[in-house]
Each structure stands twice: as structure tokens, then as C-alpha cells.
Amino acid sequence: MERQHLSSVYESDLQEIREKLLEMGGKVELMISDAVRALLERDTDLAERTIAYDHTVNRLELEIDEKCLEVIALRQPAARDLRFITMALKVVTDLERMGDKCANIAKRAKELNCEPPLRPFIDLTKMAEAASHMLHDALDAFTRADEQLAQKVCAGDGFVGRLNKQIQRELLASMMADSSNINRALKMNQVSKCLDRIADHATNLAEMVIFLVKGRDVRHTVGEN
Amino acid sequence: MVMKVQLDKLNIHFGKTHAVKDVSMDFPENSVTAIIGPSGCGKSTMLRSLNRMHDLVASARVTGKVLVDDTDIYDRKADPVSIRRRIGMVFQKPNPFPAMSIYDNVVAGYKLNSRLVRAEADEIVESCLRRVALWDEVKDRLKTNSMNLSGGQQQRLCIARTIAVKPEVILMDEPASALDPLSTLKIEELIEELKERYTIIIVTHNMQQAARVSDYTAFLYLGELIECGETKMIFTTPQKKQTEDYVTGRFG
């Protein structure tokens, strides 16, 4: 079990950052499901709420950044605490970008909702679920300091990438079959790319969890050895 | 990497108290090694054993080997005076000789070991004071009493006195703990410069100081060496839970 700091103020500072990171992650999870639901259920109100919600994620990014700088300046963290602060500073950027991607999906949903629907793309739902799961598991791995779960998240990125390619192929075929599909298919393509990027950011988060737990930097190691 | 000082199963007892337990570690040449650990962990005791300062303590018993350049300083034939010339020491509280001038303080140790002609002494005083970055501050008052200097200047004077006898190893026991932050930074800067010529072993309570000045760090707890390695590793990814708890301030 993790021991507490001798300084209770320091302990509560770190706890505050931890809780805010989880809060931010939870909000992004909600944004992913809302953005995709707004698209699939053609719910423009939900799309607008999702776009507006991005501000709360942005605000948390600023708050976490500020708290991390304060801890570095006042506490000079070392070892696991240093890795935690480093991780927090990197991870907030990933989470904030995920929020942006969700807002992008919601914007595309708003535009697409004004036009007749394209045929349903089942893989898009699968992709959204997979990306959302990856983020959920990465946050879980962070909470439980579970390196194995984090490894599992990293392995899941390939699946989302393949789904993205599959959707792109289908969209291309749809555009070639009927040029009136082009505008909508291009927007759907952006949605698919956004989900792919969300999965990439979730992988970054999981990699940082491995760094936090094991002190081992596993970024950019695919294809090495 | 050449090892200047090597400890082999070092044990130090004071009467029934076992202060340092079976410590084996190496100190690389021309580098700074910091020894950290909570109060009473044996770090100062260990440091003092490296130039046989426990010889005068009746209850002290040192076993194991302390090798300097492969020669055991606890060998019966080893001469403590020559050992202490090779292995200098700087203490927590600046301790210039109070009745002596700045000039005489610098050459005090040297005079014990050899005769000095005036020109030689002048040269030693200037070069040592320059090396500790004190020359410009005191060159016009070398003959004044050393006690008129500030705490930080006095400590640098003590370091000048230590290096005047051309040691190979410098032991520092909390050398900056009695100094203000600016004087502390000057001492730390000086340590960085000194390691080009000497092997430095420093005991410090201040973990940030250990992180700033040392190349290697050893963590001692209850007389045992828990972990020793590159300072960067000890402060970012220590291998032992006890080390991690200590450097992150979770030690109960």
C-alpha cells in the first residue's frame, strides 16, 4: 500500500491533481459517447451541448497545469511523485485534445443532421465503443496503478486503426458510387479520423501509466528490438 | 570508471551499538557521491571512518576494509597522518583556526607536513583561495583574522585549507547546512569544480542538495546500505521501495 507523505499539504496537493485528472477523464468519456450518439441518433441539441461542454475540459486542463507547476516549484517532487507530475502535465494535453476531437465530431454531427442520412456505418459505433473503452481502461489502470491493464490498452490501438481504415474504404466506395455522397462521406471520414486520434491519445495515457508505475518509458518502442 | 575508494563489508560498532552494518560500495574517482538517509542512519559515522576519525574513540570498533587506491587504510602498517593528508575533511560548521589570519589558516595543514619558504606559501595561499573563489574577496586582508569572514567565506576558507595539502579525496559532512542559501549555492558550485581534481564524498540531510551536486547517491537506513546508484536514477526511478519512500518524503 502507498504510504502517505509526511506533509499532509503535499499529500492533498497530489490528491487534488489525481482527482482532477480523473474528473477530466470522466468528462471526456462522456463527451465521446455524447458526440457519437448525437451523430447516430441525429440529435442536434446533444451535439451543441457536447460542443459547449468542451470548455469544462479546457478549464480543467488549465487548473491541473497550474497545480502541477505549483507542486514543482514548492515541493521539488522526486521519484514516483516526479513521474506522477510529469505524467499529469502530459496527460492533460492528451485529454484536452480528446475533448477537442469530440467537439469536432459533434460539429460534424450538427452539419450531417441537416442532410439526409448516409447508410449506417456499423464499424463507426464499434470504433466509438472501442476508443471509449480504451480511455476508460487507461483511467482505470491509472487509478489502480495497473501496468497490465495499461499494456492491454496500448495493444488495443491497432484494432481501432484497422476499423478506421475499413470505414475509409467504405466511404471511398460510397463516394465513387454516387458523387452526391461526397460531402457527407468526407464529414464521416473526419469523424472516423477523430475517433482514431482519440484512441491514439488513450494509448498515450496508458503509456504514461506504465511510466508512472514502472519508471519505464515505452513510448516509440513499437518495432524496436 | 576508476574506483578511488572501496568499502568491503564495513562494520562500525560503538560499544554494543552496531552503527554501520556490512556496507560494501565503491566511490568513483573524480566524481561526487552523496550519502543520504534519516538522522541516526550512520551516514556521518561511515564518512568519518573513511579517514580513521574513530581511532580516538575508545568504544569504536571498525571491521572490514576501506580501500583507497587498493590500499586498506585500516591496515596495521597504514599511517593515520598520511591517510588524513590524502583524505581531507570539511565539517558542518565552518571551523577556521580562530587565532590565525586568513593566510595562516590556508597553510596551517601544509606547515604540519612540510617546511615552507615564503614564496611557496604565497603561491599556495593564492592558488587555493582562487580555487575556492575567495581570493578576490580577501586578497587585500589576508593577514586579518579569519573570524571576521562571513559563515560562507569561512567555509570556503576551510575548503581552501583542506585542498592546500593536496588531498585526493575530500569528505564533506553537511558542508552547507549552517549557511544561507546564497553561500550554499557557492559551496555547491565549488563542489562541482573541485570534482575535476578530487573525489568527493558528501553527507547531506538536504535531498535537493544531494540531487543538485552529486553524480552518485547512496541511501543508508539504520546502518544498512539500502541502495546506491546514479543520482538521476535514485531521484527518478529508485529500485527499492524504502529509497522511494525516503526521497518522496513518505518516511515514517
Image: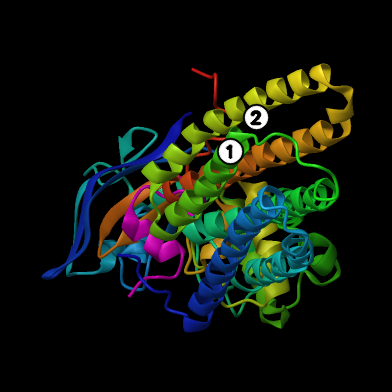
Q: Residue at x 40, y 70 (%)?
A: B250
Residue A63 in percent (x, y) is at 71, 71
- Residue picked out by circle 1: A127
Q: Chain of mark 2?
A: A
Q: Residue at x 67, y 27 (%)?
A: A167
Residue A21 in percent (x, y) is at 58, 64
Binning the other alpha carbons within 10 Å of mark 1 as few (below 14), some (14 to 19) or many (20 upward) gives many
Q: Secondary structure at mark 1?
A: helix
Which sits in the foreground, A154 or B18?
A: A154
Q: Is residue B250 magenta?
A: yes
Is label 2 in contact with label 1 (beta carbons under 8 Å)? yes
Q: Chain of mark 1?
A: A
Q: Residue at x 62, y 70 (%)?
A: A71
Q: Which label's residue is closer to the chain start, 2 or 1?
A: 1
Q: Residue furthest front?
A: A116
- Residue picked out by circle 2: A164
B175 vs B114: above or below: below
Give the CA separation, mark 2 to mark 1: 8 Å
Q: Amino acid at mark 1?
A: Met
Which sits in the foreground, B23 or A15?
A: A15
Q: Residue at x 47, y 69 (%)?
A: B205
Q: Is residue A29 magenta?
A: no
Left or right, residue B208 beside residue A61: left
Q: Which residues are magenta?
A: B230-252
